[in-house]
Amino acid sequence: MEPSNQLRASLLRLIADYQRRVAAFAQAVQAKYGKGDLLAAWLAGEIPQDGMLDDQKETRFTFHSVGCCVTSVEAEVDFDFGPEGRHDGFDGWRLWTLAESRPQEYPQFQRPEIVESVLGELVTEGIVIRPHRMPSPHLCYLNLSERR
């Protein structure tokens, strides 16, 4: 097992990868459907619950509850929307899902309890915060004021 500092750095890399993938998906859906608030657009029936993002049919999405699952040939990400339409929130399960879909890149995070443990360390250190805000009070966010 990696020393704790290395695991924290690796989890921060996983978080950045997760946020990058979610942001790219959100931008692509916003461009395809011409809607800014994706959750509101889906709930209003302006975006389908299930669909393909590309003509090659390599990226599938499924909206659910207050989030969306995106599956592509590269990886799988599942995210929930946060306050004011944010989509940069995460939790241990969502990070583990991405890590599990990319085992060569994230071999150290193939067990969800390891992701949860290291995420807990980042929360304790103040690098990650849990503001408990609706519509997804379980989500964590990077504490940008604490980033060095």
Image (cartoon, rainbow, N blue to C red):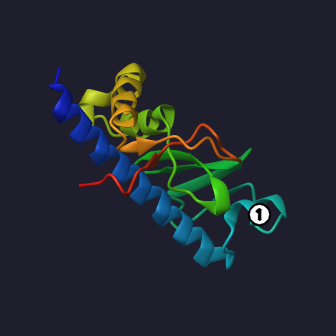
In percent of width and height, residue 64 lies at 71, 45
In percent of width and height, residue 128 lies at 40, 43
- Residue shown at 40% from the left, 51% from the top: 143
- 26 displayed left or right of 37: left
**91 relative to 143, above or below:** above
- 103 displayed left or right of 55: left
Is residue 54 in view?
no
Q: Relative to the observer, which residue lies in front, 134 or 29? A: 134
- 124 displayed left or right of 89: left
Q: Relative to the observer, which residue lies in front, 114 or 74? A: 114
Quarter of the figure that contains the C terminus? bottom left
Q: Mark 1 — residue?
A: 40
In percent of width and height, residue 47 lies at 74, 65
Quarter of the figure that contains the N terminus? top left
- Residue shown at 18% from the left, 33% from the top: 5
Is residue 35 in view?
yes
In percent of width and height, residue 95 lies at 43, 38
Farthest residue, direction right: 44
The number of discs equals 1
- Residue shown at 81% from the left, 58% from the top: 43
| SS at circle 1 | helix
Q: What residue type is labelled 1?
A: Ala
User: Alpha-carbon neighbours of circle 1 within 10 Å: few (<14), some, or many (≥20)?
Assistant: some
Q: Tell me where residue 50 sits by quadrant.
A: bottom right
